[in-house]
Amino acid sequence: MKRTACLVGAACIGLALLPVAPPAAAQGSAKAGAALAQKHCASCHSIAGTGPSPNPSARPFRGITKDWPADAIAEALAEGIRIGHGAKPMVDVDFTIEEIADLVAYLASVQR
């Protein structure tokens, strides 16, 4: 009996020391992401599924994940890194985690 109690106690301690899985990635709303893209991105990028970008050097959203995976874009936006903008900096926006998930959902919806 004493041995069983020790084994159960050791198992509980072992389970408590296991790393906890990170929370699942937030599921964004493509509709909310479209509104954010219109507000913050459309002055330079084509945010729709077709057409050229207003700024010829700004990549259209419909192909942006060919060069940068969606998770890398999300991480870069969360860290405040302005990827791929060269000499023309991206507008200074501090997106929330929910807004980033919305933008990534929208990006996924317009990929070709």
Image (cartoon, rainbow, N blue to C red):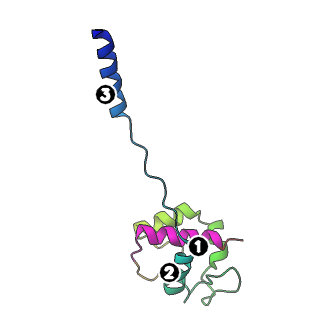
Q: Earlier in the sequence, mark 2 or mark 1?
A: 2
Secondary structure at badge 3 equals: helix
Cα separation between marks 2 and 1: 9 Å
- The residue identified by callout 3 is 13
Q: Tell me the quadrant of the picture where the N terminus can be found.
A: top left
Q: Is residue 65 magenta?
A: no
Q: Position of residue 53 (x, y in %)?
A: 64, 86
- The residue identified by callout 2 is 36
- The residue identified by callout 1 is 106
| Type of amino acid under label 1 | Tyr
| Type of amino acid under label 2 | Leu
Q: Quadrant of residue 47?
A: bottom right
Span colored in magenta: 94-109
Q: Earlier in the sequence, mark 2 or mark 3?
A: 3
Decide: few, some or many residues near mark 3? Use Cα within 10 Å; few <14, some 14-19, many ≥20.
Answer: few
Q: Is residue 103 magenta?
A: yes
Residue for point 70% across, 86% down: 51
Q: Earlier in the sequence, mark 3 or mark 1?
A: 3
